[in-house]
Amino acid sequence: MSKNIELYEESKLYSPGGVHTSIRNVNPMKVFTKGEGAYIYDADGKKYIDYQGAFGPIILGHSHPYVNRKVIEAIERTDLYGVGCTDLEVELARKICTHVPSSEQVLFCNSGSEATYHAIRLTRAITGRNKLIKFQGCYHGWHDYVARNMLSSWDMIGKRDPGSAGMLDEAIDNTLVCTFNDLDDVERTFRENKGQIASLIVEPIPHNIGCVMPQPGFLEGLSELCTAHGALLIFDEVITGFRHDIGGYQKVAGVTPDLTTMGKAMANGYPIAAVAGKREYMQRFNTYPGGDVWFAGTYNGHAVGTAASIATLELMENEPVHEHIFRLGEKMRSGIRGIHERLGIEAYVAGFGSVWTTYFMNNEPKNYSDLQQNDAELYVNYRKKLIEKGIFKMPMNIKRNHISYAHTDEDVDTTLTIIESVLKELVH
Ligand code: PLP
């Protein structure tokens, strides 16, 4: 019997569905036992070139030797104290405040969901208002403030679509949903909820639906609308942060939000996240004397995450990490476009930097609604076939792919050859 199947069957005995995060239960189901550089290995020893990248954290490659060494060095001398602060926290905070434009001050937590929760609650305290704007299709974590209108079924777009049973009605109804790239919709929402909106949270590039780019002026427009209506702008850079630039996508776009949430690529797969922003706002957290917004967590600032993040940022500072992943991203996208041309396939290759996806539709999507045009069945079958041939992409509709610093030109060439053969098989 396959070791993969054997372990999966056992996993299901002990954990509901056999996985520890909702959408990890995919078909084909894999049990992974090793990750090294650009490659991952399942329990049967099959090797894959990995483009899932753990949904984005793996920016340097799996089990990166420098990051691992720095973590081991750190945990051989230090761990967690539950009081005071550590030298590692100081060093990491200094780095983030140096690189991320909106980060005058920063606080560490353990997951992106915690970071968005803290950021949103802070904006409610600052403004004395309750409502939040988010965009249809964007994901900001699992908590009640934001878990609505994520990957809604097409008939639920823009309607009241809680992402989970058990959510508080009040939380659902205080979160308003707008259409990405539609400033008129945002403006109307502000007008209709005059004086009630505390903040607007946005993935500057909504990567949770692949790669839908903000149209020129959109992010600037959000910033202006927030200022005009006395609301705070939160950039959720949990995916874009550190992956698209060491300063985040805000650095690329030249738009500085009031608050930023970060995670994922921040520590190459080790668990740590952050919320950052203007000093006057951050000092409302009760880590500051007199601050009245609760901020706590037993594991916040643990040596493992902080050491991993320092090491990851050091490599970004000292090596051509972004140059490499951007070049390979472009090589991948133009290679795939060439394949589509040769095979006469109408598809839209979307992407930015190290992230890309192929939508099986013939124009650029500007928002979640546009993605109805994508051929979902083909999108998923294509990915399943690629997995069979050793290219790992999430076998799910409108999911993105990531390139890491460990991927090589040869990996991209191999991937392109396999993509061409799979597409020939699927569409001819
Ligand atoms: N924000 C964005 C943009 C995300 O993509 C995610 C996770 O995918 C989160 C927040 C939540 O982060 P976490 O899964 O670490 O709680």
Image: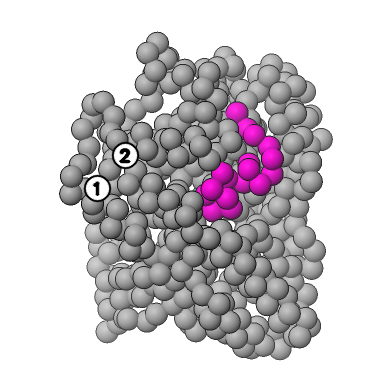
Q: Position of residue 113 (x, y in %)?
A: 45, 40
Picture quadrant where residue 374 is located: bottom right
Q: Is residue 104 magenta?
A: no
Relative height, residue 212 to residue 297 (above, below): below
Residue 44 pos. (x, y %): 31, 81
Magenta part of the protein: which range? 242-258
First in sequence, mark 1 or 2: give its number: 1
Q: Residues within 10 Å of mark 1 (few under 14, many from 20)?
A: some
Q: Quadrant of the C terminus?
A: bottom right
Q: Amino acid at mark 1?
A: Ala
Badge 2 residue CB within 8 Å of ligand 1 = no
C-beta proximity under 8 Å, tags 1 and 2: yes
- Residue 74's mark? 1
Q: How is the image coloured?
A: one colour
Q: Residue at x 53, y 60 (%)?
A: 320
Rate crowding at label 2 as few (under 14), some (14 to 19) or many (20 or more) other CA atoms within 10 Å: many
The three-letter code of the residue at mark 2 reads: Leu
Position of 322 compared to 48: left or right?
Answer: right
Which of the 4 image quadrants contains residue 413? Answer: bottom right
| Of the pair 318 and 347, the residue shown nearer to us | 318
Residue 88: image tag: 2
Q: Is residue 194 above or below residue 78?
A: above
73 is higher (above) or lower (below) than 161: below
